């Protein structure tokens, strides 16, 4: 049994998991990210791209209304707006890790992301942020304390063999979800467990089983 501890444990190494790890590390806390595969190739972003979240301010209301229509009202407009704004402010900061294309006028084209290269760049940024990545470490169980709060996770080391257990002050599940009939490849549901409460965030990812 491998036992570790950290301030924040991220479960999932796709688009949401890597950005969550970067954001947590920016606050100066210790972060561990576990992925059932290899962080940098995980999630639907590896075979597609998240360009639909790059929306100029003047076009956001229409974009959100369109997604709500295709989702039959099951999506949350407030979280869509937050995801779009976060993308708008965060994506340019990846320029040292991803070669964004430019048009004939020399304008950077942030929307035209290529999924595989994007995730490889995110992995490098995660590592440069001081995050510990554990590849091929699927999480199989969440740990709870006597009050029911999530305090870590337990899983299996696919390549090395044996169990792992990580205790953490906060656990982020960035393990994927469905697209609410929107015809997208996936819409990630990021759940932040802290003090027994959950918050939901729509991004891309892979399901936890």
Image (cartoon, rainbow, N blue to C red):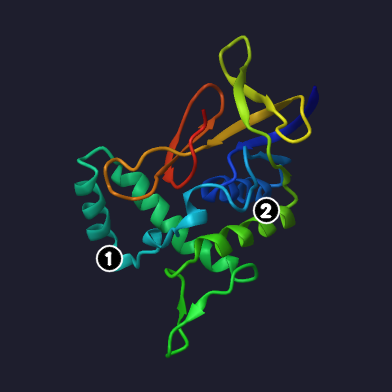
Please identify the quarter of the rendering in which residue 125 is found: bottom right
Please give the name of the residue rendered at 45% of the width and 33% of the height, measured from the top-left corner.
Answer: 199
Q: Name the residue under label 2.
A: 126
Quadrant of the image containing the N terminus: top right
Please give the name of the residue rendered at 66% of the width and 36% of the height, measured from the top-left corner.
Answer: 8
Total labels: the figure holds 2
Q: Distance between the residues labelled 1 and 2?
A: 31 Å
Q: Mark 1 points at which residue?
A: 59
Task: Classify mark 1: helix, strand or loop.
Answer: helix
Residue 94 to residue 45: above or below: below
Asked whether the residues under the numbered discs 1 and 2 touch, taking CB atoms below 8 Å apart as contact, a structural biologist would say no
Q: Which of 141 and 93 is in front in this view?
A: 141
Residue 40: give x, y in percent of width and height. Answer: 62, 53
Please give the name of the residue rendered at 62% of the width and 9% of the height, measured from the top-left corner.
Answer: 146
Please give the name of the residue rendered at 70% of the width and 39% of the height, measured from the top-left corner.
Answer: 32
Residue 78: give x, y in percent of width and height. Answer: 33, 45
Residue 204, numbered circle: none
Residue 181 to residue 90: above or below: above
Residue mark closest to the camera, 1 vs 2: 2
Q: Is residue 133 left or right of residue 189?
A: right
Disc 2 crowd rating (10 Å Cα; few below 14, some 14-19, many 20+) is: many
Task: Classify mark 2: helix, strand or loop.
Answer: helix
Q: Disc 1 or 2, which lies upstream in sequence?
A: 1
């Amino acid at each position: 049994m491998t036992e570790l501890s950290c301030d924040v444990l991220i479960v999932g190494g796709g688009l949401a998991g890597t950005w969550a790890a970067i954001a947590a590390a920016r606050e100066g806390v210790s972060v561990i990210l576990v992925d059932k595969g290899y962080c940098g190739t995980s999630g639907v972003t590896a075979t597609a791209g998240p360009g639909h979240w790059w929306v100029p301010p003047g076009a956001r209301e229409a974009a959100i209304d369109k997604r709500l229509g295709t989702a039959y009202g099951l999506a949350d407009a407030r979280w869509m707006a937050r995801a779009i704004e976060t993308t708008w402010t965060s994506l340019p900061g990846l320029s040292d890790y991803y070669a964004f294309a430019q048009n004939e006028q020399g304008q950077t084209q942030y929307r035209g992301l290529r999924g595989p290269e994007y995730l490889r760049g995110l992995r490098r940024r995660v590592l440069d942020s001081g995050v510990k990545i554990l590849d091929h470490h699927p999480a199989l169980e969440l740990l709870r304390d006597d009050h029911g709060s999530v305090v870590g996770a337990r899983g299996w080391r696919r390549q090395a063999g044996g169990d792992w257990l990580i205790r953490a002050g906060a656990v982020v599940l960035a393990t994927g979800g469905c697209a609410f009939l929107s015809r997208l490849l996936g819409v990630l549901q990021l759940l932040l467990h802290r003090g027994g409460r959950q918050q939901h965030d729509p991004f891309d990812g892979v399901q936890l089983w």
